[in-house]
Amino acid sequence: MPRVTLQTLADELGVSRMTVSNAFSRPDQLSAELRDRILAVAVERGYTGPDPAARALARGAVGTIGLLLTDALQHAFTDEIATRLLAAISEELAESGRGLTLLGSGSRGDLVPARDVPLDGALVYHCEVSSVAVDWLTRRKLPLVFVDQAPVRGYPCLNVDDRGGARAAAQHIVDLGHRRVALITKAAGASGRLQPSSMRHEQFTTRRRMEGWLDALTPAGITPMLLNAATSTEEAGAAAAAVLLDLPADERPTAVLAYSDRIALGAMQALQDHGLAVPGDVSIVGFDDASFAERTRPTLTTVRQDVARKGREATALLCAAIDSRAPQRTDHRLLPTELVVRRSTQALSAARTASAT
């Protein structure tokens, strides 16, 4: 059977080759009746449309943006905050007709996604700017928007107020009378004790939340115990909390501030499994306000961030940059956070306050 082409359809329909092409790529240029007739004949002949690569070359755009993740790609589907961000990005993209491609920061053989995958622009999510993948995207001179990381000169950047949210969480603990406090952060390396000096090399959100906690704890004269959960998972939170269980009761922190709700949940369950009451023995605060925070027992005090707004605004910034085809302007946005007090925190009793100081 002869190969069906644009010219084949044009000859059969008695229209120009450009008219057939417009039926697929620029439908607003044709009447609805003519476009429907062209598409019906195309279906009969088994023609699916112009080659996408050729069409992208002609338009100077591929109709797809990338989302670069430092973590393994499965993180986007197993972490609730990441999936909520993806949903918001997809919702915003639906209005522009663009697609979304997830990009890992690694490579396989000769394929380097950040270098080789066709894109009109990319959202760089939770990646260090020293990443090789980030370097490839900037070298390609693509429009970029950085999300949840340090502002980069010459590019839009969107963050939530991690420091302010963490400060509010720590101040809540201080106001409840707690003086023995543990911080469970997320840093590279194994779970366990950390030294404060190691924080300067960690990711932006890790550093900002640490700074916020210390903003409230240091003026109160509190030197917290610093623990690491190597990943933002319940398992890592439980492993970090295990350090607390090895301490004598009169040395054990009476409050825990966690980098994320998942870490807080893991720590809470580990402590409860060993007979400690939350918040009777230990108050716990998370960060993010994941949907399960209202279903934990007790319900979890946490810091709420508007993940959907973050995804929508970051995507809108990127689409505007792509559509304008003008040099990007630096636009650093900071979205607010909110402390949500639930039942996993309570004031220290007068007797326990005396023993904890």
Image: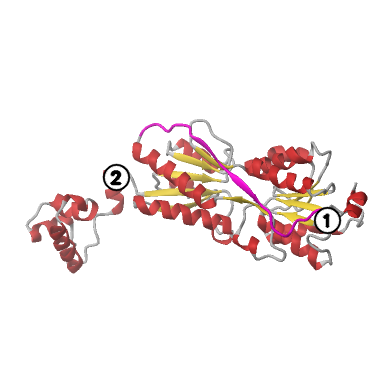
Spatial CA distance of label 1 from label 2 is 57 Å
Give the side of residue 36 with respect to residue 140, left or right: left
Which residue matches tag 2?
Answer: 57
Q: Closer to the N terminus: mark 1 or mark 2?
A: 2
In this rendered view, identify the residue nearer to me: 84 or 133: 84
- The picture places residue 98, in percent across and down from the top left corner, at 36, 51
Among all residues in the image, which is located at the extreme front?
350
- Density class for disc 1 (Cα within 10 Å; few <14, some 14-19, many ≥20) is some
Helix, strand or loop for the magenta stretch, by majority: loop
Q: What residue is rendered at 40% in x and 46% in y?
A: 119
Where on the picture, by quarter, is residue 345? bottom right
Q: Is residue 250 left or right of residue 211?
A: right
Left or right: where does residue 166 sit relative to residue 353?
left
Q: Residue at x 88, y 58 (%)?
A: 246
Q: Which residue was labeled with disc 1? A: 243
Task: Give the magenta-colored segment's residue range.
Answer: 326-348
Can you tell which quarter of the image residue 40 is in? Answer: bottom left
Callout 2 amino acid: Leu
In the rendered image, residue 94, in percent from the top left (x then y), is placed at: 38, 54
Report x, y in % for residue 304. 61, 51
Query: Residue 346 or 206: which is nearer the viewer?
Result: 346
Give the residue type at disc 1: Val
Give the percent coordinates (x, y) of residue 90.
43, 55
